[in-house]
């Protein structure tokens, strides 16, 4: 999963991240989720997924 996220960020932002830790230091969890979902072709569902997780009492930092 981490490699997939690195690939998504590198291609989306034309960067050269080498580790997931670098991305986590620079971006909030919600943006990491959004970039990865968009990269995978799942556009427009980030907010719904975050809301669903909240309803299940699983909270992520926004």
Image (tube, helix red, strand yellow):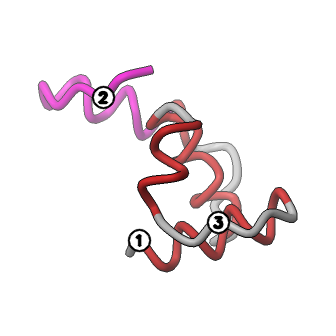
Q: Residue at (57%, 69%) from the top-left corner?
A: 6
Number of residues whose C-alpha sits closer than 10 Å to that of mark 1, classed few (under 14), some (14–19) or many (20 or more)? few
Secondary structure, mark 3, is loop
Q: Position of residue 50 (x, y in %)?
A: 40, 32
Residue bearing the label numbered 3: 17
Number of residues whose C-alpha sits closer than 10 Å to that of mark 2, classed few (under 14), some (14–19) or many (20 or more)? few
Number of residues whose C-alpha sits closer than 10 Å to that of mark 3, classed few (under 14), some (14–19) or many (20 or more)? some
Select label 2 or label 1 by which is in front: 1
Give the residues in magenta.
48-62
Q: Residue at (17%, 31%) from the top-left corner?
A: 58
Residue bearing the label numbered 1: 2
- CB contact under 8 Å: marks 3 and 2: no
Q: Residue at (37%, 26%) from the top-left corner?
A: 51
Find the residue positioned furthest to the right.
14
Q: Nearer the viewer, residue 3 or 39?
A: 3
- CB contact under 8 Å: marks 3 and 1: no
The numbered disc on residue 60 is: 2
Q: Quadrant of the N terminus?
A: bottom left
**From the viewer's perspective, is 59 left or right of 57?**
right
Mark pair 3, 1: CA separation: 11 Å
Task: Inspect the magenta stretch and tell me whether residue 61 lies in it.
Answer: yes
**Vertically, is 22 above or below 61?**
below
Select label 3 or label 1 by which is in front: 3
Q: Residue at (69%, 58%) from the top-left corner?
A: 38
Mark pair 3, 2: CA separation: 23 Å
**From the viewer's perspective, is 51 left or right of 14?**
left
């Amino acid at each position: 999963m981490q490699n997939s996220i690195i690939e998504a960020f590198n291609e989306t932002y034309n960067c050269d991240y080498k580790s997931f830790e670098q991305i986590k230091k620079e971006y909030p969890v919600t943006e990491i989720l959004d970039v990865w979902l968009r990269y995978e072709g799942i556009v427009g569902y980030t907010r719904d997924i975050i809301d669903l997780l909240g309803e299940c009492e699983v909270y992520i930092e926004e």
